[in-house]
Structures are given as C-alpha cells and as structure tokens.
Image (cartoon, rainbow, N blue to C red):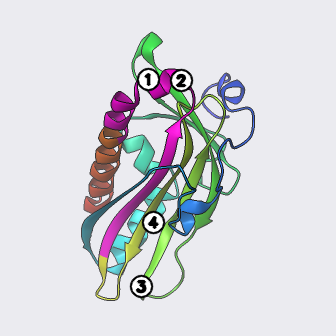
Amino acid sequence: MSGDPGAGRTARGGLNYPGIGSTEHGQAPEGFPCLVSRAYLGDGPALYRRLAQGILSWQLQKRSGLRIRTDSDAVVPGARVVSGFGVGPFRINAPCEVVWVRRPVPGDGPQRAGFGYGTLPGHPVRGEEAFEVEIDAAGRVFLKITAFSRPSNWFYAAGAALTGRAQRHVTSRYIGSAHELAAGES
C-alpha cells in the first residue's frame, strides 16, 4: 500500500460482515443499525461531476482529516484503504475494502456516483459505508452517506456511545469536505 509499508499488514483478511454490497441498494442486513445522512451541496452537472471526481479519488476522506493509506489512487472495486484517526498511541486504524463503485454516466439527467466499502479485520466495527453524490431532475446536488455497523468486539461494544459520537463527528467532517469540494477549494 502506498505511503506506509506497514499498511499491508493492517489490512489482511477478508470482509467480516453479512450483506456485502448492501449500501448500494439501501438495505442493511438484519441486526445492523443503519444511518443515512444527506446534505444539499448546490446545483448543476458541473458541480455533480466535480464532486463525483473528488469522491472517487478519496478526497472526501483525505479532506476530513483522516490519515488515509490505500493501494489505489482511484476508488476501484477491491481497493483496500486504511483510515486512521486519533493521536499517537491512541490512533485507531480502520481497514476497509471497496465493494462497489458507480461512476458518472454521460448526460445531465438524474444519476448518482460513488462507492461503498466494507470493514476488514482490525476495524473497530463490522459493516459497510457508502459515499454518493446525487443529482436530481431539477439539477440539485446532494451528498448521501449510508452506513450500517455493529461493534467488532466486546471492547468496542462497551464504548458504543463513544463510537456513535465518533461516527457522527466523522460524518459531519465528510459533509464539510463535500462542501469544500463543491466550492472548488484545493
């Protein structure tokens, strides 16, 4: 993986939850709470395409303040990524694998683009998260984040309230990153 020789060790193993790919169709597996966040970002196909490009090149994650290590500069099925958050010895690595990708299609009609990735062993939760940009028939552009998960072990289950707060915080950072991309900030 680029950027960190140890990242490959962190992301070994396979996807570790049921319902792989479920975020693409909006149906979480039974027993997995689902959270959907949606934010209006502006209007027009140029904005939609700029956001799609940013999402499909990890910019949403990078701009949100997460430390990102990946084996692919572009989001592609099977790509592995390790997001790190926290400081020093309190840094938590969250390894994931991309399970589906939807690219923009030619034309200006309603569509969506983005990807979903699922957790790998070593992640604090088991589940999936998707990041999509949508343009509707009126040309309005929205970011949609869909996530379903459960704690990966008793330790993270004991801190479920903290884990939920952390997830809401990171989601708000993703939305802020999407607003930066919408504004064309580099």
Q: Nearer the viewer, mark 4 or mark 1?
A: 1
Q: Secondary structure at mark 1?
A: helix
Marks 4 and 3, the one that precedes in the sequence: 4
Task: Give the Cα distance between marks 3 and 2.
Answer: 43 Å
Amino acid type, label 1: Ala
Vertical relation: 179 (above or below) 91: below
Q: Secondary structure at mark 3?
A: loop
Specify the label residue 158 is tagged with. Answer: 1
Write down the residue under mark 3: 110
Q: Secondary structure at mark 4?
A: helix
Q: Which residues are magenta?
A: 141-167
Write down the residue under mark 2: 154
Q: Nearer the viewer, mark 4 or mark 3?
A: 3
Marks 2 and 4, the one that precedes in the sequence: 4
Write down the residue under mark 4: 52
Task: Give the Cα distance between marks 3 and 1.
Answer: 42 Å
Residue depicted at x 41% and y 50%: 60
Vertical relation: 71 (above or below) 36: above
Residue depicted at x 69% and y 44%: 15
Q: Nearer the viewer, mark 3 or mark 1?
A: 1
Marks 4 and 1, the one that precedes in the sequence: 4
Residue depicted at x 57% and y 27%: 153
Amino acid type, label 3: Pro
Residue 163 within the segment the image draws in magenta? yes
Marks 3 and 1, the one that precedes in the sequence: 3
The answer to whether mark 1 and mark 2 are in CB contact below 8 A is: yes
Q: Nearer the viewer, mark 3 or mark 2?
A: 2
Task: Give the Cα distance between marks 4 and 1.
Answer: 37 Å
Q: Tell which residue pokes out farthest to the front in this image.
A: 31
Position of the N terminus by quadrant: top right
Marks 3 and 2, the one that precedes in the sequence: 3
